[in-house]
Image (tube, helix red, strand yellow):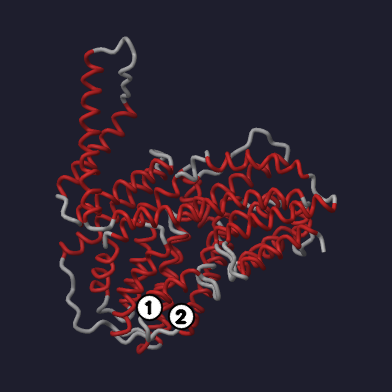
Amino acid sequence: MPLDLMMLGALIGCILLGFPVSFSISGTAIAFAFLGWATGALDLSLLGALGQRVFGVMTNTVLIAIPLFVMMGVVLEKSRIAEELLETMGRLFGSLRGGLGISVILVGALLAASTGIVGATVIAMGMIALPTMLRSGYDPKLASGIVATSGTLGQIIPPSTLLIILSDVMSNAYQQAQFEQGKFSVETISVGQIFAGALLPGLLLVVIYIIYVLARAFLVPGDAPPLQGGVRPGRNEIIRATVPPIVLIIAVLGAILGGIATPTEAASVGAVGAILMGGVRQGLSAKVAIAAAAALIILAIAAGVAPVRLQRSDVTIVGWVQGAFYALLALGGIAAIVASLRRLNNAGMLKPAMTSTMTVTAMIFGTILTASIFSLVFIGLGGEERIEEILTAMPGGPTGALVFSMLMIFILGFFLDFVEIAVILLPLITPALILMGHDPYWLAILIAINLQTSFLTPPFGFSLFYLRGAAPPEITTGQIYAGVAPFILLQIVGILIVWLIPAIATWLPGVIF
């Protein structure tokens, strides 16, 4: 068997044996690099490019957004904003047949657009919504499936770490495909374009889930009965629970899609907004938080429209006054942020939030860095050409190659995490698929929905593990697996709809960008 294919098999075997993913990726790569050198299949000097690859990852401005978005989601989860949203929406829709399920799906969509953290969403809904659904008489399998699936919306509804990583991978693949076509004035794919492309398909999945829950509640009323005796929340309670997350969503996504800020800048806005919202939850005056947010927004707009450079020798009195005004705005915003951080720290939330952020960020970047080693060795062993030959030889031409690639991603999703698939497999197959004529934006969204499904597919679906840890004891692992099975089929339906109607993924990026 060729060394490149043996290398892929060895990697999957190491991961299935339980070795840490990053060590499995780098260890396999190094072992096969020396094996290839010993057999004459690899020039070891190729590894000299490794330093440049690592430097490129560490200086990639797009990837800087990942820890900021993670921080935003973790702070919102730790400060119980997500919990209040779940409770309020549950009582708002609970009187309808299937209403609790609908509320969980809608809250999953809102949390997806404001946090993007699958684990936080699934655990929060597993601890709060799942017991309520069971007490109301919901079928345990249906309830488990709704909670596990709604949590995965954080990977397809922007902003999400999956979409950020995918945009970087697809941009590199698109540039590589253009170079191979002889184009040296190449186009790139931005995070904002991928976010715009994923928005409508993400909402499409929400609609598909809701239709399924309503249909099941109608056909089998005992599976999703209405909530009995619940107190409907008042207008002020609904506003208090829903407006802050929605404002944060509009601020972050609006800044990116509107071209006002880069994804990294928008991520920092989201992180600061989450800190201020968390501070308000811990007793900081809402007026102070709103004033601080307004001051920072005014500062950002004013500094962009009328910048001032005090280091210049020709600064006028107007310039000094302008600079002093900007400094006051900055100090006001910083003071409120520090006050929020102090309150979060006193409540014991800041340290866990920072630890979670660093843990998730280290895991993602560790995988990306070690994947650079793997892909470099794999390409050196001729793996890239072999993948291209396999795709080209597929019956059905470009469509057959895409079907094969989507099936391969779906099957690998049973065993591998989305980060591993995105940074190891996708750089190998996406350039060839783009060269075959597939639209890169449409292709990215199809892959994103497919990778989202990997959170639900046993035995290693992360959403299943999160729910298993948060679910009540009476919920069995078998019930969780049985509950997500219909939703995996719904994911496939979503992929087919986007496949047959590409405009769902390509229309919004075309309009905005």
Frontmost residue, 352 versus 57: 352
Query: For residue 121, what is the image quadrant?
Result: bottom left
Q: Which residue is mark 2?
A: 480
Q: Position of residue 256 (x, y in %)?
A: 41, 44
Of the two numbered discs 2 and 1 on the same chain, state the one appearing first in sequence. 1
- How packed mark 1 is, by other alpha carbons closer than 10 Å (few <14, some 14-19, many 20 or more), is many
Quarter of the image where one finds residue 319: top left
- Left or right side of 92 for 207: right
Residue in the picture at 26% in, 62% down:
80
Secondary structure under the numbered disc 1 in the rendered image: loop
* Residue 417, percent from left and from top: 55, 63
Residue 76 position, x and y percent, is 31, 57
Verify CB contact (< 8 Å) between mark 2 and mark 1.
Answer: yes
Q: Residues within 10 Å of mark 2 (few under 14, many from 20)?
A: many
Disc sitting over residue 471 in the figure: 1
Image vertical order of residue 293 relative to residue 245, above or below: above
Identify whether 477 is placed above or below 243.
below
In the rendering, which numbered label is found on residue 43? none
Q: Residue at x 38, y 38 (%)?
A: 260
Residue positioned 77% across, 60% down in the render: 390
